[in-house]
């Protein structure tokens, strides 16, 4: 499954979230990414800004308070089967210490965002992005959290995200 | 970065190369067999022997004098005219021997004169008793046999195969003079070869091809140096490797750093530091009690733990993790930790619950900050490495200056040789090494 601009747009249209489509590099920068991080992606790559989507729609959905959400949602397409999925990505680029990562917070983000994208299947892996100074500590933390996190919670770098899905 | 203390080392057992900074808290990590403990012990003994150089010279002098002391003992035992004289002379000899063996001699030349005088007296009385026929003379054959033993080492040193020729009592006096003079000169010039020999003795005759101890850019010791400098930055070095040292009788203790540590823990400081913030936190919130050496029972050589509810236990019966904290608690209380102290801890996480690993790391960071004491930790525990890294950052604005991490990594082409790579404050490569365990686990369960 790889990123697909058309799928991303269709996913956004299906939930009336076209206005929350934003350049991926802008979202990365706003979450603590550097220029070097942004170079990894094409400038016209667009993604749904998950936080903006939540901020603007929670009251419409009858909720009294903001739900946790993943930072990014993009459409994926399997070029052979044409199957589509929504990939949820959380950017942890500002983190200074992986000890603050908690299972319930991560699960809350995934479940909060999943509520938005009920029109298309959610990709089985939820990606949490760390910079190169913290990725090994994050891998260690994810593996040692108890009760254990499912194997579908995946710590990765932006480079790995790009290699795997873009 | 200016190195407060820098230790450079090449080619010693598993350690191919290490260049270690001790500016505050230094953590060395690596797999089993990568040389962490070797490095720690080498640094300990090098510093310990620099600091205790005078005692090493004195111990060497004592070793060299032992064959002469045995000879004097033989003369006294065989030639004293009665039991009173025998006991009197033996007591004098034992007292002088005990001073040499146990006490720190401040004026070695004065002590030399005492020994020369003593030997002269013993010999004079020997001849006097023989002349007066109070006692029978020892056979010349036996005397020569013992005397040759005294001088045989000299022959071996000079690589001559001839056995020692007949020697007389005057040669013994001359030998005493020479040994004391040699020791006196060694004290004056601080002979680096004596330090090298002392390190080699600890490590079964092995020594690195290179070892440099550098303080504030001044080299105070290297293998090719003639003299040893004076250590300004470190004047007290402590090695901790297991809380089980509380449960070891001296005579069974294999490593003398454990004996040294036990002795240090027994010492009562004149100015107790049990009112410091760290001590109160440690005793009140973490240990809920205080460790102390049992001074009430004169037959005991044990440490006690007095719990906050008034119960008293032999510390050997307490939780091992508590014993680990007790070592540092006693060092704080006894005033052993200051800005000239280097504390080396091999696997500080051993025996500790993860929660207490974090508390132990917090204690180390606080002690370093409050006292300026330097810590060298050999660890392969993610919680310890992480806690040291982030508590230091949270509590010390200058943590980048004082905190250093190293990872032992195999030298290309060799499985058994390691280079200690400097990571500064980046612990990612250490975690990458820790995370290899997940791949192993995956291999076993998939």
Image: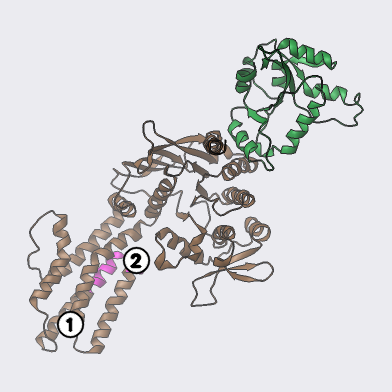
Chain colours: A green, B brown
State the extent of the magenta-drawn residues as a range.
B101-117
Chain for disc number 2: B
| Residue toward you, B401 or B144 | B144
Of the residues under marks 1 and 2, which one precedes in the sequence?
A: 1
Q: Nearer the viewer, residue B25 or B338?
A: B25
For residue B105, the mark is 2
Q: Position of residue A51 (x, y in %)?
A: 79, 24
At 49% from the left edge and 65% from the top edge, which residue is drawn? B247
Quadrant containing the C terminus of chain B is top right
Q: Please tell me whether residue A118 is drawn above or below residue B222 in the rendered image.
A: above
For image coordinates 60% across by 22% down, the residue present is A160
Corner quadrant of residue B304? bottom right
Q: Position of residue B30 (x, y in %)?
A: 47, 41
Q: Are marks 1 and 2 on the same chain?
A: yes
Q: Is residue B213 left or right of residue B436?
A: left
Does B103 appear in magenta?
yes
Horizontal and vertical percent for residue B395?
A: 64, 43
Q: Is residue B264 visible?
A: no
Q: As drawn, is B353 to the left or to the right of B5? A: right
Q: CA distance from mark 1 to mark 2?
A: 30 Å
**Which of the 4 image quadrants contains residue A69?**
top right
Q: Main secondary structure of the magenta part?
A: helix
Judged left or right of residue B18, residue B405 is right
Q: Which label is found at residue B303?
A: none
Secondary element at image label 1 = helix
Please say whether residue B46 is visible from this viewpoint.
Answer: yes
| Displayed quadrant of residue B140 | bottom left
Residue A6 image position (x, y, % from top left): 74, 10
**Mark 1 falls within which chain?**
B
């Amino acid at each position: 499954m790889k990123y697909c601009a058309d799928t991303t747009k269709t996913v956004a249209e299906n939930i009336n979230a076209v206005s929350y489509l934003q350049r991926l590099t802008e979202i990365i920068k706003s979450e603590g990414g550097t220029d070097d991080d942004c170079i990894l992606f094409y400038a016209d790559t667009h993604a749904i800004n998950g936080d903006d989507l939540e901020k603007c729609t929670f009251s419409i959905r009858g909720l009294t308070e903001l739900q946790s959400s993943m930072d990014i949602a993009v459409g994926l397409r399997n070029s052979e089967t044409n199957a589509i999925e929504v990939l949820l990505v959380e950017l942890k680029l500002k983190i200074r210490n992986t000890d603050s990562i908690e299972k319930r917070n991560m699960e809350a983000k995934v479940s909060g965002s999943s509520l938005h994208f009920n029109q298309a299947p959610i990709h089985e892996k939820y990606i949490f992005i760390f910079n190169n100074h913290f990725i090994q500590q994050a891998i260690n933390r994810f593996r040692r959290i108890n009760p254990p996190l499912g194997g579908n919670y995946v710590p990765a770098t932006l480079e790995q995200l790009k290699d795997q899905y873009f | 970065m200016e190195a407060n203390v820098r230790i450079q080392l090449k080619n010693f057992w598993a350690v191919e190369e290490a260049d270690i900074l001790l500016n505050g808290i230094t953590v060395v990590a690596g797999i089993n067999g990568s040389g962490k403990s070797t490095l720690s012990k080498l640094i300990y003994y090098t510093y310990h022997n620099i600091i205790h150089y005078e005692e090493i010279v004195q111990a060497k002098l004592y070793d060299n004098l032992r064959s002469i002391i045995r000879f004097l003992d033989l003369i006294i035992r065989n030639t004293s005219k009665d039991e009173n004289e025998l006991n009197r002379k033996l007591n004098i000899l034992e007292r002088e021997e005990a001073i040499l063996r146990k006490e720190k001699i401040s004026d070695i030349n004065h002590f030399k004169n005492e020994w020369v005088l003593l030997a002269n007296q013993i010999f004079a009385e020997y001849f006097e008793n023989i002349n007066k026929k109070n006692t029978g003379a020892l056979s010349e054959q036996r005397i020569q046999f013992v005397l040759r033993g005294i001088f045989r080492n000299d022959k071996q040193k000079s690589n001559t195969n001839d056995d020692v020729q007949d020697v007389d009592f005057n040669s013994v006096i001359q030998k005493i003079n020479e040994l004391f003079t040699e020791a006196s000169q060694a004290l004056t010039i601080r002979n680096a070869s004596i330090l090298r020999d002392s390190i080699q003795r600890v490590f079964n005759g092995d020594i690195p091809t290179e070892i440099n101890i550098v303080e504030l850019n001044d080299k105070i010791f290297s293998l090719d140096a003639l003299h040893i400098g004076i250590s300004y930055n470190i004047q007290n070095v402590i090695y901790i490797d297991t809380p089980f040292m509380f449960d070891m009788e001296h005579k069974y203790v294999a490593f003398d750093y454990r004996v040294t540590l036990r002795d240090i823990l027994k010492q009562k400081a004149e100015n107790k530091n049990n009112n410091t913030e760290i001590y109160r936190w440690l005793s009140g919130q973490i240990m809920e009690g205080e460790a102390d050496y049992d001074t009430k029972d004169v037959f005991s050589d044990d440490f006690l733990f007095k719990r906050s509810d008034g119960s008293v236990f032999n510390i050997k019966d307490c939780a091992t993790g508590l014993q680990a904290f007790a070592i540092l608690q006693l060092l704080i209380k006894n005033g052993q930790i200051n800005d000239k102290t280097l504390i080396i801890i091999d696997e500080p996480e051993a025996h500790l619950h993860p929660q207490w690993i974090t508390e132990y790391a917090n204690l180390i960071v606080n002690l370093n900050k409050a006292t300026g004491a330097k810590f060298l930790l050999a660890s392969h525990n993610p919680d310890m490495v992480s806690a040291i890294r982030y508590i230091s950052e949270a509590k010390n604005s200058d943590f980048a200056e004082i905190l250093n991490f190293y990872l032992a990594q195999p030298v290309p082409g060799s499985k058994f040789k390691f280079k200690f790579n400097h990571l500064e404050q980046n612990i990612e490569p250490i975690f990458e090494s820790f995370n290899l365990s997940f791949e192993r686990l995956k291999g076993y369960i998939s």
